[in-house]
Image: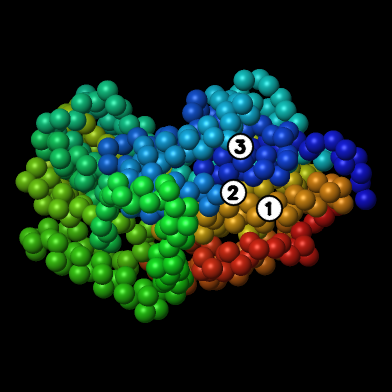
């Protein structure tokens, strides 16, 4: 039994002040742990909701579900909230819990090294820190994937990635190209169809579109939520929505289930019934199964692409020239603005930070094959370092806030083994990770994500990097760690 730390406060360093880092900071303080520092590379909190400011940005998870369980929000304006509203929600939570005082802004962690049972940390400002625990809440989708397209540097207009929106670019009556048809590209095209003179959507791969009604909450509903905490809790934990999300979760893990066939029918009918021109309909028809890529929810994308000022192109982008884009078929189209809605490098997580665990093993070495974490939270030989929304966690069309809260419940039990003085360090065992990964990969290949399409869910070997079981099974797994899967010393 080690009593060294019993009478002192352990120190906690949180990497990132996005949704998960804010959660960790609140939970630590709530548990009476006040020696906490959050390092944030940017000048504001918010993570993905700070980075993405593109027109049409909205959350495709229902607002009352995309909310901390302990901070319901009576003021959501819509079923699917606009991005700025989500950012404002996180800012209000940070203000309420007075978290600014423990966040170091514009300070990126560059190096973490585990030595003598502590993490030794260096930052971009040349500062150093020492922590008993590191919580990596860096997020997944934060390094833009910029394609290398011949001649890109020659373009005379404005060209930028969706997560680096250039707000100095006026959009009204401009000729705009959007490359990419993920959730982002679809939202941008839908919004820009309203103002562009000419809008060309370069779709390398069409997407299935799930119809949705993005209803506004009326003033009466908001007043009810404001004045009646039970009504607010009821909408936050709406049993019908819960059942739908669970059905979706079953569908993606069991591609032959009735739940998946139901999704396929809905998106197929949406395409058949919404697009009147048969030629355009075929351009928009994917040749892979629904939800193989992240399913896109949209109220009016199909309406937008049928406007006279919008063209959907399947011709690949060959090169970019001074005045526009040359397609693979040789056609040059001229543009004022090119938007790269080309996604993110989803395998980065904490990188490019240098992270070195026990026996001088680096994260690059540990992740040489693929990023992995036992139960998505712990990496062997990286003791007392835990990840929120790390690799192999559940992804799909459900709330990552909920996932992070469940992970916190699990992680806090592991940390308590060290906090109590019983042990000095805890990390998943190599055997536990190997067994977990073997079973995970077998199941992942059978999931809908492994059914034959390209997506950011796949690792470099083409295997879905995701939690392949249901959301309910993840919740169950997060109830209590099995300590036989951990190295405790
Ligand atoms: P994405 O899903 O990875 O989509 C990237 C798109 O760019 C794909 O259509 C891809 O085509 C295309 N692309 C990439 N490189 C290209 C190239 N060189 N030439 C032509 N096309 C190229 O990225 P995303 O749309 O930014 O979305 C990423 C994730 O962010 C989403 O899946 C979701 O998890 C999250 N997100 C969520 C919301 C929300 O409402 N909650 C909104 C936006 C984003 P291929 O399909 O052919 O590879």
Residue designated by label 2: 388
Neighbor class of circle 1 (other Cα within 10 Å; few <14, some 14-19, many 20+) is many
Which circle marks residue 411 in the picture? Answer: 1
Which circle marks residue 133 in the picture? Answer: none
Task: Give x and y (percent) for residue 360.
Answer: 76, 41
Residue 334 in sight: no
CB of mark 2 near ligand 1 (< 8 Å):
no
Task: Give x and y (percent) for residue 251.
Answer: 41, 72
The residue shown at (71%, 62%) is: 481
Q: Nearer the viewer, residue 22 or 215?
A: 215
Q: Nearer the viewer, residue 100 or 292?
A: 100
Q: Nearer the viewer, mark 3 or mark 1?
A: 1
Marks 3 and 2 sit apart, C-alpha to C-alpha, by 10 Å
Contact between labelled residues 1 and 3, with CB atoms less than 8 Å apart: no
Question: How many marks can you see?
Answer: 3
Contact between labelled residues 1 and 2, with CB atoms less than 8 Å apart: yes
The residue shown at (67%, 67%) is: 435
Marks 3 and 1 sit apart, C-alpha to C-alpha, by 15 Å
Please identify the quarter of the rendering in which residue 134 is found: top right
In the image: residue 1, left or right of residue 458: right
Residue designated by label 3: 15
Q: Earlier in the sequence, mark 2 or mark 1?
A: 2
**Disc 1 element:** helix
The residue shown at (61%, 67%) is: 476
**Disc 3 element:** strand
Task: Give x and y (percent) for residue 186.
Answer: 26, 49
CB of mark 1 near ligand 1 (< 8 Å):
no
């Amino acid at each position: 039994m080690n009593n060294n730390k019993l009478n002192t406060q352990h120190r906690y360093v949180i990497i990132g002040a996005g949704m998960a880092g804010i959660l960790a900071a609140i939970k630590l303080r709530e548990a009476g742990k006040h020696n906490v520092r959050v390092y944030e590379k940017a000048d504001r909190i918010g993570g993905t909701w700070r980075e993405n400011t593109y027109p049409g940005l909205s959350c495709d998870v229902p607002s009352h579900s995309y909310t901390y369980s302990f901070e319901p929000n009576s003021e959501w304006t819509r079923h699917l909230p606009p991005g700025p509203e989500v950012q404002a929600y996180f800012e209000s939570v940070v203000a309420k819990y007075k978290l600014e005082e423990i966040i170091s802004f514009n300070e990126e962690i560059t190096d973490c090294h585990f030595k003598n049972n502590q993490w030794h940390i260096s930052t971009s400002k040349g500062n150093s820190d020492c922590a008993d625990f590191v919580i990596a809440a860096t997020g997944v989708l934060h390094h833009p994937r910029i394609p290398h397209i011949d001649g890109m540097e020659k373009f005379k207009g404005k060209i930028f990635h969706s997560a680096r929106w250039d707000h100095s670019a006026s959009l009204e009556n401009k000729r705009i190209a959007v490359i990419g048809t993920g959730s982002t590209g679809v939202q941008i095209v839908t919004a820009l169809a309203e103002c562009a003179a000419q809008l060309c959507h370069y779709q390398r791969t069409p997407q299935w579109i799930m119809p949705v009604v993005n209803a506004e909450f009326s003033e009466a509903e908001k007043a009810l939520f404001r004045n009646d905490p039970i009504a607010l809790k009821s909408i936050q934990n709406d049993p019908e929505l819960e059942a739908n999300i669970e059905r979706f979760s079953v569908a993606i893990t069991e591609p032959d289930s009735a739940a998946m066939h139901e999704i396929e029918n809905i998106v197929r009918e949406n395409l058949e019934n919404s697009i009147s021109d048969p030629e355009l309909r075929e351009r928009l028809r994917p040749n892979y199964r629904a939800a193989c890529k992240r399913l896109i929810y949209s109220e009016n994308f199909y309406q937008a692409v049928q406007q006279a000022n919008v063209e959907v192109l399947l011709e690949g982008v060959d090169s970019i020239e001074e005045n526009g884009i040359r397609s693979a078929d040789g056609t040059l189209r001229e543009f004022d603005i090119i938007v790269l809605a080309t996604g993110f490098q989803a395998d980065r997580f904490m990188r490019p930070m240098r992270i070195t665990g026990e026996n001088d093993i680096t994260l690059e070495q540990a992740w040489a094959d693929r990023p992995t974490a036992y139960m998505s939270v712990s990496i062997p030989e990286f003791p007392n370092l835990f990840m929120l929304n790390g690799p192999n966690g559940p992804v799909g069309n459900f709330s990552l806030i909920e996932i992070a809260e469940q992970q916190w419940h699990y992680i806090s039990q592991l940390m308590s083994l060290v906090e109590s003085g019983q042990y000095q360090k805890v990390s998943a065992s190599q055997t536990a990770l190997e067994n977990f990964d073997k079973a995970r990969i077998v199941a992942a290949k059978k999931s809908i994500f492994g059914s034959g399409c390209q997506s950011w869910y796949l690792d470099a070997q083409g295997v879905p990097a995701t939690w392949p079981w249901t959301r309910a099974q993840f919740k169950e797994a997060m109830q209590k760690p099995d300590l036989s899967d951990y190295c405790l010393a």
